[in-house]
């Protein structure tokens, strides 16, 4: 039995459901925030060996030991403020200790929730991180802006409202607003964006061609986006795999940029990537690889 | 070189540690943990790992911080999320900043926050508890009131504590001698079943069996332990604990990378059962002697060598 946790209406989850059904896999979808209405969880947390317990829904019962794998579709980026955390929390405890593969365990996903925390890990894996300043002191921003020859972006420190913007002269005039909350400023790195989807040992690299500062929101800025499948240099591929290992992520969307001088920068890893749009552009079998991983 | 304390202004442990440090003439910067950057400017370069805190009349370079006492209850963000959007956003940003910043500091940080930290380690680290040489009390997490009642009947002869994974500090006794005297057997069954049904209607519950034995509270500060037991008035007073059990508690805290931990034990004749492990001990029930002992142990850890 494969357990999918998340909103069944979510595009990524719907994609996986379709592929799992096509493959004749035995699976169930539970939304942990509303699941109590249909699913009973019973978990003995003191078991001597592996976790004991079961899930019961309708007339079906499955032991926790019988779970082949779990896929967690974390939609926190869209909906964290309205989450029914009291429903989700028992799951977050259980997902840490289930003996089967969990894609991804909450503690692993949470390692990416703080960009500066994650950056320190990234820097250990042979990938460059941009010059970065976190501050709530306006004067420090101005100095950083000068040091970077005026090429500075800013973005959130957590995953909330994570949209990348260029720091403009208009922004410099309203820097007093940073006093209320630390903000992350980074030297703008010119180059080509590459999104790498890590699925187990497999890597799918997509080059993203756009004029937008943040290609995810290119439409909002009136910019176009074109994507294509590319091969990764061996050393970069090794870095992506080892980064995934240290973060504890068996599936991840890793955001890289190849600078004109050939350096590979890494901005962050997303523990629950919305891979479907990349797959639609490039025909890379990312979803199929995830299904294979879950069925292994 | 000074020590930074990030805590609520009314945090008793933080207040006592500050006093103990100042008595030893160690400079202390005290910042409100929930909004530390309201009173202090921060400039931190991640790639060069350099930076400083700018205070009203002074500046503290991050590489000259001697130690940090960080006192924010795990899971605080879950509560924050319920609030308004901007308030929640700022809370997330501050939390993410602290997570990165405190991970980067080379000095002792008590306790260094970690991603997705839970209010209790018992559910997620039962193996660590056993590896340290302690038993794990029978514990059930369920949304099924029938399963809760079956577990209660099978494992909770001495009574149980019931709570939730979200409010780990709000434990209520169920069953046990007190209930037996207050109710007849049939009435006791009905009351217990009704309580489980009401609780699981709201959210999944956690049920912990209370084993037979003496209940003690062990505070671990690095390699030291401070043990308390409740007196008749419910106050924690200094108590003895055998050397093997003290060593087991130190092993457990170390395996969880906690330099400050609270471990609830029920000590039997030959072994001890762990009821709970948390990283955020409160002094609310401690007497003055225990408070002072704990504060001094923490001050020594944060200040470095004795006499510093």
Image: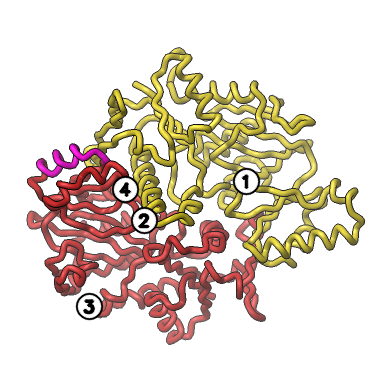
Chain colours: A red, B yellow
Point 34% across, 52% down: residue? A158
Point 55% across, 57% down: residue? A93
Work out how far the residue at label 1 is from the one at label 4, CA to CA, in angstroms. Answer: 33 Å
Q: Which residue is mark 1?
A: B169
**Callout 3–callout 2 Cβ contact below 8 Å:** no
Q: Which residue is mark 4?
A: A121
Give the quadrant of residue A242: bottom left
Q: Are marks 1 and 4 on the same chain?
A: no
Point 26% across, 57% down: residue? A238
* Dominant secondary structure (helix, strand or loop) of the stretch shown in magenta: helix
**Callout 2–callout 4 Cβ contact below 8 Å:** no
Q: How crowded is the residue under tag 2: few (<14 C-alpha within 10 Å), some, or many (20+)?
A: some
**Which quadrant of the rendered structure holds the N terminus of chain A?**
bottom right
Q: How crowded is the residue under tag 1: few (<14 C-alpha within 10 Å), some, or many (20+)?
A: few
Q: How crowded is the residue under tag 3: few (<14 C-alpha within 10 Å), some, or many (20+)?
A: some
Tell me the subunit letter for badge 3.
A
Where is residue B161 shown, x and y percent of the image? 72, 50
Residue A171, relative to residue A34: is it above or below?
A: above
Work out how far the residue at label 2 is from the one at label 4, CA to CA, in angstroms. Answer: 11 Å
Decide which of tag 2 and tag 4 comes sooner along the chain: 4
Q: Are marks 2 and 4 on the same chain?
A: yes
Specify start and end residues of the magenta stretch as a single range.
Answer: A136-146
- Indicate which disc residue A245 carries: 2
Work out how far the residue at label 3 is from the one at label 2, CA to CA, in angstroms. Answer: 26 Å
Please tell me whether mark 2 sits on a helix, a strand or a loop.
helix
Q: Which residue is mark 3?
A: A282
């Amino acid at each position: 039995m494969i357990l999918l946790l998340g909103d069944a209406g979510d595009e990524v989850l719907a994609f996986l459901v379709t592929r799992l059904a096509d493959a004749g896999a035995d699976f169930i979808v539970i939304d942990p925030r509303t699941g109590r209405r249909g699913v009973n969880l019973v978990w003995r947390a003191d078991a001597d060996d592996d976790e004991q317990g079961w899930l019961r829904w309708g007339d079906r019962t499955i032991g926790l030991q019988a779970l082949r794998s779990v896929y967690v579709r974390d939609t926190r980026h869209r909906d964290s403020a309205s989450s029914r955390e009291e429903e989700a929390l028992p799951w977050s405890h259980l997902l840490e200790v289930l003996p089967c593969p969990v894609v991804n365990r909450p503690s692993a996903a949470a390692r990416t929730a703080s960009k500066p925390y994650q950056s320190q890990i990234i820097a250990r894996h042979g990938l460059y991180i941009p010059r970065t300043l976190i501050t709530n002191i306006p004067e420090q921003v101005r100095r950083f802006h000068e040091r970077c020859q005026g090429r500075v972006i800013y973005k959130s420190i957590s995953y909330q409202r994570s949209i990348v913007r260029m720091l403009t002269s208009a922004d410099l005039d309203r820097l007093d607003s940073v006093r209320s909350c630390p903000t992350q400023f980074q030297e703008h790195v010119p180059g080509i964006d590459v999104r790498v989807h890590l699925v187990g040992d497999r890597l799918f690299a997509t080059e993203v061609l756009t004029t937008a500062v943040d290609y995810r929101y290119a439409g909002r800025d009136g910019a176009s986006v074109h994507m294509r499948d590319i091969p990764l240099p061996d050393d970069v591929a090794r870095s992506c795999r080892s980064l995934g290992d240290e973060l504890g992520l068996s599936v991840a969307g890793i955001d890289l940029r190849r600078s004109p001088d050939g350096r590979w920068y890494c901005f962050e890893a997303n523990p629950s990537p919305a891979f479907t749009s990349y797959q639609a552009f490039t025909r890379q079998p990312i979803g199929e690889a995830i299904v294979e991983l879950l069925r292994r | 070189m000074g020590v930074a304390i990030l805590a609520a202004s009314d945090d008793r442990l933080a207040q006592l540690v500050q006093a103990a440090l100042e008595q030893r003439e160690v400079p202390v910067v005290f910042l409100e943990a929930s909004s530390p950057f309201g009173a202090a400017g921060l400039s931190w370069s991640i790639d060069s790992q350099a930076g400083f805190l700018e205070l009203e009349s002074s500046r503290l370079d991050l590489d000259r911080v001697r130690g940090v006492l960080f006192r924010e209850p795990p899971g605080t963000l879950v509560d924050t999320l319920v609030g308004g959007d901007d308030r929640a956003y700022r809370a997330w940003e501050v939390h993410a900043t602290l997570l990165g910043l405190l991970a980067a500091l080379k000095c002792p940080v008590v306790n260094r926050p970690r991603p997705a930290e839970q209010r209790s380690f018992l559910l997620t680290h039962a193996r660590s508890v056993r590896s340290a040489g302690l038993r794990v009390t029978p514990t059930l997490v369920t949304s099924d009131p029938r399963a809760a009642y079956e577990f209660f009947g099978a494992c909770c002869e001495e009574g149980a504590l019931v709570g939730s994974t979200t409010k780990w500090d709000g434990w209520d006794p169920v069953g046990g001698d007190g209930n037996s005297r207050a109710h007849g057997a049939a009435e006791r069954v009905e009351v217990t079943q009704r309580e489980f049904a009401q609780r699981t209607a709201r959210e999944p519950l956690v049920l912990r069996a209370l084993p037979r034995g003496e209940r003690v509270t062990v505070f671990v500060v690095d390699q030291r332990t401070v043990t308390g037991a409740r007196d008749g008035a419910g106050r924690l007073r200094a108590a003895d604990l055998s050397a093997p059990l003290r060593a087991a508690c130190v092993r457990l805290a170390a395996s969880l990378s906690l330099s400050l931990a609270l471990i609830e034990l029920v000590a039997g004749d030959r072994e001890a059962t762990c009821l709970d492990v948390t990283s955020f001990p409160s002094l609310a029930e401690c007497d003055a002697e225990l408070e002072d002992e704990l504060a001094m142990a923490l001050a020594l850890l944060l200040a470095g060598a004795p006499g510093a």
